[in-house]
Image (cartoon, rainbow, N blue to C red):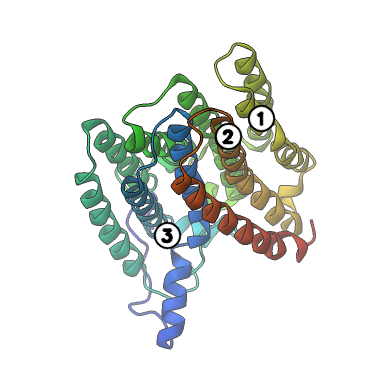
């Protein structure tokens, strides 16, 4: 891809002739579905915020929210694979969590497959927005789709101008839970804004680390991420300092009666993951291929783990009231949590236990 125009670089006219089953597997891998666990936990957090606020569980809007979240998330991946192709080719040391799926880089599928799929998912997302009930929810959803598409697509190409980290944080962990909450209840509280703000800030820091892992390839292709602009030492200081601010901020907000104790405790409970990632960054682990995968893996896992911890805290707080938690949501979130834990167990085995850290 020409970095100044955003158009794909010349590639062979046809991908290698693969058996149909292999093409299907490559297509699925191209969408990087393992990241969908993030949006699943985000929606769970948003619905739980609504339940904690005393509202009923509305299954229909939950299903719509999940469809929209997954559709938009996949759209972003397929779009990024196409418009990030130059940077992915230049990345000599990708991890399992950074550097793209490597499907297009390996020539397993033609780039146009990725772009075409992204457009189809974009249109489906627009249809889902159209059936949302209020102007506020439609505007939030439209902002999510817009920021997601232009994360790498021209003319904005946000991740090429040191705005991708912020855009991703706003889309997934900022607007994401607020949309899920608003579709359930029609409104959000001050505490809901704090929860979304906390996970949004952590996602911003996490994305900074992910881009740091790709810094050399990004530099070569003129991709000015925050990591490229700041440099590794300053970016690591930003990550560590940001984690300290969030960790200290939640107990302070509890003391000021802005959030209940369960919310503050949830952030503290997951902080060892952030401490471990910070230590690894400070000791240069990201520069060592054998260690880099574990760093990017745990930086990524910190997000759904924190969302899960806050969600469980909210549900525990709601169960301690007269209104309790709707049985339907307890059942749905129970399945969601069990699915996440099964997936996490497999991910730990595949990304940490089988690799030197």
| Residue furthest top as drawn | 256
Task: Answer with the quarter of the image where residue 272 lies.
Answer: top right
Left/right placement of residue 127 relative to residue 302 reads left
Task: Answer with the quarter of the image where residue 227 lies.
Answer: top right
Q: Earlier in the sequence, mark 2 or mark 3?
A: 3
Q: Are marks 1 and 2 in contact (CB under 8 Å)?
A: yes
Front position among marks 1 and 3:
1
For image coordinates 37% across by 45% down, the residue present is 148
Q: Mark 1 highlights which residue?
A: 243
Measure how far apart labels 2 and 3 are at the Cα level.
24 Å
Q: Which mark is residue 259?
A: none
Dot 2, crowdedness within 10 Å: few (<14), some or many (≥20)?
many
For image coordinates 47% across by 46% down, the residue present is 327
For image coordinates 53% across by 35% down, the residue present is 204
Measure how far apart labels 1 and 2 are at the Cα level.
7 Å
Q: Nearer the viewer, residue 303 or 146?
A: 303
Q: Is label 3 in a helix, a strand or a loop?
A: helix
For image coordinates 44% across by 39% down, the residue present is 47
Can residue 222 be spotted in the picture? no
Q: Mark 2 highlights which residue?
A: 202
């Amino acid at each position: 891809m020409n970095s100044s125009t955003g158009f794909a670089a010349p590639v062979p006219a046809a991908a290698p002739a693969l058996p149909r089953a292999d093409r299907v597997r490559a297509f699925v891998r191209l969408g990087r579905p393992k990241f969908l666990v993030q949006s699943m936990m985000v929606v769970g957090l948003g619905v739980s915020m609504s339940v904690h606020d005393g509202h009923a569980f509305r299954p229909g809007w939950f299903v719509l929210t999940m469809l929209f979240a997954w559709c938009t998330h996949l759209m972003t991946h397929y779009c990024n694979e196409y418009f990030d192709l130059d940077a992915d080719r230049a990345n000599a040391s990708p991890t399992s969590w950074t550097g793209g799926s490597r499907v297009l880089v390996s020539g397993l599928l033609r780039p146009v497959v990725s772009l075409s799929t992204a457009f189809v998912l974009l249109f489906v997302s627009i249809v889902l927005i159209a059936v949302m009930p209020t102007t506020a929810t439609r505007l939030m959803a439209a902002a999510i789709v817009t920021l997601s598409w232009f994360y790498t697509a021209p003319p904005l190409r946000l991740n090429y101008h040191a705005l991708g980290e912020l855009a991703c944080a706003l889309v997934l962990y900022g607007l994401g839970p607020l949309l899920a909450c608003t579709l359930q209840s029609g409104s959000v509280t001050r505490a809901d804004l704090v929860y979304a703000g906390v996970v949004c800030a952590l996602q911003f820091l996490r994305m900074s680390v992910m881009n740091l892992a790709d810094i050399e390839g990004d530099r070569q292709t003129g991709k000015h991420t925050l990591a490229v602009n700041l440099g590794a030492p300053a970016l690591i200081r930003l990550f560590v300092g940001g984690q300290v601010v969030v960790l200290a901020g939640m107990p302070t907000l509890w003391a000021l009666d802005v959030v209940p104790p369960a919310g503050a405790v949830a952030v503290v409970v997951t902080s060892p993951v952030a401490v471990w990632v910070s230590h690894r960054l400070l000791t240069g682990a990201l520069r060592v291929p054998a260690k880099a995968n574990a760093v990017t893996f745990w930086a990524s896992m910190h997000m759904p783990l924190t969302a899960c911890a806050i969600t469980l805290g909210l549900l525990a707080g709601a169960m301690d009231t007269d209104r309790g938690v709707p049985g339907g949501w307890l059942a749905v979130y129970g399945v969601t949590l069990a699915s996440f834990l099964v997936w996490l167990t497999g991910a730990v085995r595949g990304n940490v236990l089988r690799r030197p850290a």
